[in-house]
Image (spheres, grey):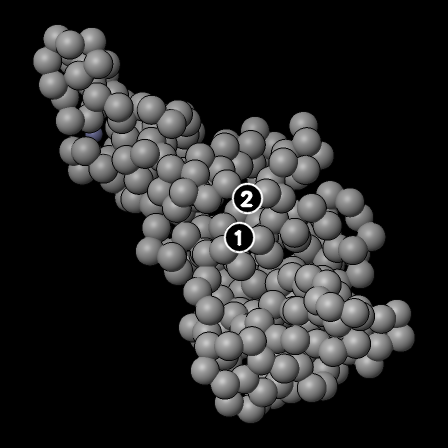
Amino acid sequence: MRGRTEALVLRAAEYGEGHKIVTLLTREAGKIGLVARGAGKPRGRLTAACQPLVCGFYSFSRFGSSLGTLHHAEIERVFRRLREDLLLTAIAAYVMELTDRMLADGEPQPEFYDQLKAGLAAMDEGKDPLVLMHALELKLLGLGGYRPVLDACVECGRQEGPFLFAPRLGGLFCSACADRQAGMPSARSGGGFSARADWAAGGVVPLNASALRLLRLLGGVDLRRLGRVEVRPETERTLREVLRRYFEEQADLRANSWVLLENLLR
Ligand SMILES: [Zn+2]
């Protein structure tokens, strides 16, 4: 396959003497790995286009599922602010790591590509980076088949709150079910058997109405048309907690870049 495609750099690793292996999220060909000759040298022809937080047009050849070769690249945009601000850099690194780990090689996801690019651009232009991050997390969960249940209790189907978010069960858990479960003997205590005895393992997070509304909104929002979203800090913290636990429990994913980000957000 030879092609020219719009792409974002997900990551780049040193390769041999002065070369790089760059992992791109392309709009038309999905995630691909390419050898970029000379991209590890300061004045290499491909060097600037193989840095993180760049998008552009990349010409490459690739046969089968092997590593391809990057021939030519034109930078469309450098996300400068994301590079210069430590917190924004950490948020972008986390989003890129999640994208890299959630998407399989070579499966085109043009709609997600557009959302990721729009999300990074909006962060770069000063919109609330954590709200954008949570929207992209929810979109990645949807793509991976891990969309959380947010319309009703996963246990009884009840649609009225108050709700907890139970990451291990995959979504909302109503307070009536929580009370009932709390009163049941658990398997571990030896008093009987409850299939849901460990429903609270892995942590549950109480959700207030605004956190639930925001969770429902962000999964489906089009980041190319996102207006101003006012989010209270405690609501954002709730979403952060819900999504981190959910990625761990459902997608078995603990991002390496989360450690730095979590420290910066304390
Ligand atoms: Zn319930």
Q: CA distance from mark 1 to mark 2?
A: 7 Å
Q: Residue at x 41, y 42 (%)?
A: 252
The x, y position of residue 248, in whole percent, is 43, 38
77 relative to 232 in the view: left or right = right
Pointer 1 and pointer 2: residues touching (CB < 8 Å)? yes
Q: Which mark is residue 255?
A: 2
Residue type highlighted by circle 1 = Leu
Q: Residue at x 26, y 23 (%)?
A: 198
Sequence-first disc among 1 and 2: 1
Quarter of the picture for ligand 1? top left
The x, y position of residue 126, in whole percent, is 73, 53
Q: Residue placed farthest to the left in the image?
A: 192
23 relative to 193 in the view: left or right = right
Q: Residue placed farthest to the right in the image?
A: 43
In which image quadrant can residue 230 be found?
top right
Residue 168: tell me if it is visible.
yes
The x, y position of residue 117, in whole percent, is 61, 66
Q: Which residue is mark 1?
A: 98
